[in-house]
Image: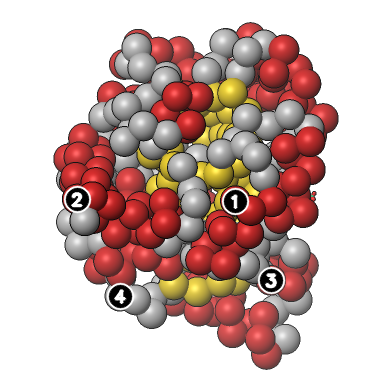
Amino acid sequence: MKTRITELLGCQYPIIQGGMAWVAEHTLAAAVSNAGGIGLIAGGSAPIDYLREQIRLCKEKTDKPFGVNIMLMSPNAEDLAQLCIDEKVAVVTTGAGNPGKFIPAWKEAGIKVIPVIPSVALAKRMERAGADAVVAEGTESGGHIGENTTMCLVPQVVDALEIPVIAAGGIADGRGIAASFMLGAEGVQIGTRFLASEECQIHPTFKELVVKAKDTDSVVTGRYTGHPCRNIKTKFAKMLANGEKDGSLTPEQFEEVTLGSLRKAVQDGNVEEGSFLCGAIAGMINDIKPCEAIVKELMEQAERLIKN
Ligand code: TUI
């Protein structure tokens, strides 16, 4: 399936792995790139030395293109942005903010720049700022989210832009990819499906929560802090959601109890205090497989559907 995205990024399939903070490290990124997609390493709020090492390890594991996600709320986003230039990373995606000020330097360095955006207005600004493509991310996604749905957002972004659009949020099988293409997208970004992959290095408890999740097992917390996040509905997430609703948890207390909660979920599998960020499509995911098998199955199903 050749699109402007496969051409732009020099990959076999128009599938980009989500840049999941604390989750997306070099083993996962290299596996997705070796499977023909574009793997991503998450900068998150990691120290610069950690990200440099991850990039170098990824280069050892794959000779295919891969990328780095810069989380713009990170206090060291500036340093990580420069590191991508120094390490000659092929692709940069961004999240949780406006990357406008970094785009000229990335473009100068020959990096393909793909901001993740939750609205048409920001998509247009990114095109004007020189982005090569955008990821239009619906509220079905895991982690930090906007309000609009994939079904509504993607066609509106496609209509508003000349550059290619990648759909994200709620896509975990070939039907989701085919549907995204019908909406005008030329690629997909997939996160949650890769949580349940063999190469993903998260705690086994996290994978088990994804595989066991039903359609109603995701919840958005933290709307009142200005950083809404979609999580798996654990006891901890329900406590946060209830505390937000009934006022028993102030925004300050919310920030306090969620500090370090991504690490507690990903590294420790701590269901009492961890935030298991995950998309609303988790209910459809029932097995853990190698990335190569996931990508192959996704593309075979999508190509069959589109041909019909
Ligand atoms: O960024 C994500 N998903 C994420 S980032 C993350 S780590 C985190 N940690 C603490 C608080 C918040 C996040 C976990 N998941 N997805 C892409 C995305 N970007 N979703 C929404 C946005 C976004 C929101 C506002 C992008 C731009 C934006 O612009 C505001 C502005 O400055 O105009």
- Tell whether label 4 touches label 2 (CB within 8 Å): no
Disc 2 crowd rating (10 Å Cα; few below 14, some 14-19, many 20+) is few
Q: Is residue 269 above or below residue 74?
A: below
Identify the mark nearer the N-term, 1 or 4: 1
Residue reaching furthest to the right: 101
Q: Is residue 6 above or below residue 182?
A: above
Residue under numbered circle 1: 158
- The color scheme shown is secondary structure
Q: Name the residue under label 2.
A: 304
- The answer to whether residue 283 of the structure is visible from this angle is yes
Residue type at mark 3: give it. Arg
Q: Identify the amino acid type marked 2.
A: Arg
Cα distance in 3D space between marks 3 and 4: 23 Å
Answer with left or right where residue 84 lies relative to residue 207.
Answer: right
Which residue is depicted at the point 19% across and 45% down?
Answer: 300
Going by the numbered disc 4, the residue's amino acid type is Lys
Q: Is mark 1 on a helix, strand or loop?
A: helix
Q: Which mark, residue 212? A: none
Any atom of ligand 1 within 8 Å of the CB at mark 2?
Answer: no
Mark-to-mark CA distance, 1 and 4:
31 Å
Name the N-terminal-most of marks 2 and 4.
4
Residue 143's x, y, as percent?
A: 54, 57
Q: Quadrant of the N terminus?
A: top left
In space, the residues marked 3 and 2 are separated at their CA atoms by 39 Å
Secondary structure found at label 4: loop
Camera-nearest label, 1 or 3: 1
Judging from the image, what secondary structure is the residue with disc 3 in? helix
Residue 33 horizontal/vertical position (percent): 34, 26
Task: Mark 1: give few (<14), some (14-19) or many (20+) Cα within 10 Å.
Answer: many
| Residue carrying label 4 | 214
Q: Distance between the residues labelled 1 and 3?
A: 27 Å
